[in-house]
Amino acid sequence: SSAGAVAAVDLGATSGRVMHARVGANTLELTEAARFPNTPVRLWEGSRSALHWDLTGLFSNVLEGLRSVARSEPQLASVGVDAWAVDYGLLRDGRLLGEPYHYRDERTADGVALVHARVSPAELYREGGLQFLPFNSLYQLAHDQETRVSEAADGFLLVPDLITYWLSGQTIAERTNASTTGLLTADGSWNDALIARVGLRRPLFAPLVDAGTGVGSLLPSLDLPFAGSGPSVTAVGSHDTASAVVAVPMDASRGAYISCGTWGLVGVELSERVVGEAGRAANFTNEGGVDGRIRYLHNVMGLWLLSESIREWQRRGLQVSLESLLAEAAALPRPLELFDADDPRFLAPGDLPSRIADWFAERGLRAPASPAGMVRVILESLAEAFAGTVRTAAELSGVPVETVHLVGGGARNALLCQATADRSGLPVLAGPVEATALGNVLVQARSAGLVSGDLETLRALVARNYAPVRYEPR
Ligand code: LFR
C-alpha cells in the first residue's frame, strides 16, 4: 500500500512528546521518538513570582525529538504541532517578548473583572460560546493590556502556533485552538467587534487557517537531517483536545468522550453550537473541532488532582510512586464520601491534599488519612464528576449517549475507567492512550493524501488498529 510517514509534536501540560507514524488506508502505526516532562518555572517579576512555561526548553526538546525522527524516517512527509489551549506568546518584530504565562498563574482575576465590566458574561457566551474559565485567553490578554505587558507586542501566537512559527517561520492562528481565546465568531472568524470592545488590538492576531492547511517547510537554519527539502509543516487540530477528539473511535451520534490527561474534557461532538442559558449555567463550552465540528464539553479537573497530590507527597519526603499508590488504592473499599472535583480551589498549583482535606473538613467530614486512601477518593470523585458531566452533556445536546469513550493517559487507569462505568451506568471503552498524537498525525496524513475521508473514516481506521478495552458498569 502507499503508507507514508508523518510526525506529531504533542505538548501536554504535564509532558510533551514527539511521535512519528506510518499511515495508509489500512495502516496506523505510532512510534515514540521522544518524551519529556513539561516543567513550569517561576520567574520573579519585581513584586511577585509568576508561573511561566519554559517554551524555550520545550522547543529544544521538540528539536531533539525531530532529529531522532529524521534518523528513522528521513523521507518524512509532514510534521504538525498540537498543545494545550489558551496560553500564548507575545511577539515584537518576530521576537518572543517573554516566556508565556501558565494558565495556572493567578494573575488573571483582574482581567476577568475588566472584561466583564465591558461585556457581560451572557453576551460573551453568545459570541464566543466558551465555558467560563478564568484563564480563557481574552481575560489574560485584557490583563496584559491593562498592565502594559503587551504594550510592545505586535503579534500574538497561541502555544502550538508559536512552535509552528519557530519550525517554519510562518505565523498563523489555527482555528480549533483560536476558538479557545473567546475571540472568534460562531462562523470562525476573528470577532473584530468583540476584540475592540474588550480593548484589544486587532493587528495582534494572525490569519486563521483550518486544520489540514499546509503552512510551509522546516527552516533550514534548524539543520534537521531530513532527506531533500524535508517535511512540510501542516496545521493540525492544534488544540490538543481537538486532535484527541479526531481519534476517538466513537459513533458521535450515540457516544460521549472523555479526553483524560491533565484535564478531563467531557462531552459530545456536535455539528452546531449550543449556546443557550442552560449550557452556560452548566458551564459547557463550544470549542471548534476539526472539519468544522463542535466540541461541546466541560472541563473537569482531571489527573492533575493526582499528579499534583503526588508532587506534594514527594515534597514532604514520602516515598510514593503512582504505580504503588494505584495498586494500594484499588485494594481499599469504595469511599462513601466524595469531594467536588470541579471546585475551582483545586486549580492552582501547591498542596492539593490539604485543600482536599479542607473541602471535607468544611462539611464536618474527614478526608482519608493515607495517600492511597486519598488517591482512591480522588479517582472516585473524578469518576463521579465524569459520569455527571456525561449525563449533562447528553441532556443539553440531545445526543442519546449509549457509550462513553475514555482516551488519553487516563485510559491506562483501570480503577478510573471501571469507576466511570459504574457511576455512569454505561460501558466505558478505554483507549487509545495516545489519541491526541493519533488525531494529529491523521489530519496530516489526510492532507498528504495518505488517507482520505471524513472524521468517521479516520475514526474507523483508529478503531481497526487500536481496539479499546471495555469496562461494563457493575
Ligand atoms: C487540555 C487542555 C484543555 C484546556 C486546558 C488549558 O490539555 O488543552 O482542553 O482547557 O488544557 O489549556
Image (cartoon, helix red, strand yellow):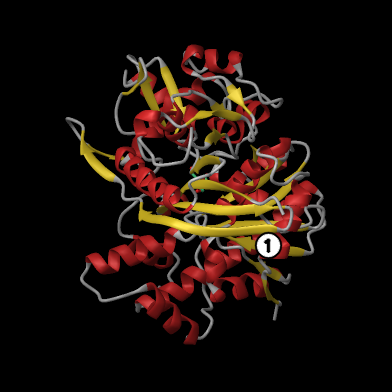
Mark 1 CB lies closer than 8 A to ligand 1: no
Picture coordinates of residue 343, whole percent (x, y)? 48, 54
- Horizontal side of 438 relative to 67 (left or right) equals right
* Within-10-Å neighbours for mark 1: few <14, some 14–19, many 20+: many
Q: Quadrant of the N terminus?
A: bottom right
Q: Is residue 4 above or below residue 410?
A: above
The one of 432 and 360 positioned closer to us in this rendering: 432
Q: At which x and y percent is residue 393?
A: 71, 52
Residue 196, horizontal then vertical, whole percent: 53, 12
Front in this rendered view, residue 82 or 269: 82
Q: Is residue 167 visible?
A: yes
Horizontal placement of 472 versus 10: left or right?
Answer: right
- Image coords of residue 92 (percent x, y): 35, 17
Q: Which residue is mark 1?
A: 405
Label 1 sits on a secondary structure element that is strand
Q: Is residue 323 above or below residue 161?
A: below
Q: Nearer the viewer, residue 9 or 318?
A: 9
Q: Is residue 270 left or right of residue 69?
A: right
Tell me if residue 275 can be seen: no
Q: Residue at x 49, y 12 (%)?
A: 203
Query: What type is the residue that disc 1 sits on?
Result: His
Label tally: 1
Q: Residue at x 56, y 21 (%)?
A: 119
The quadrant of the image that shows the C terminus is bottom right
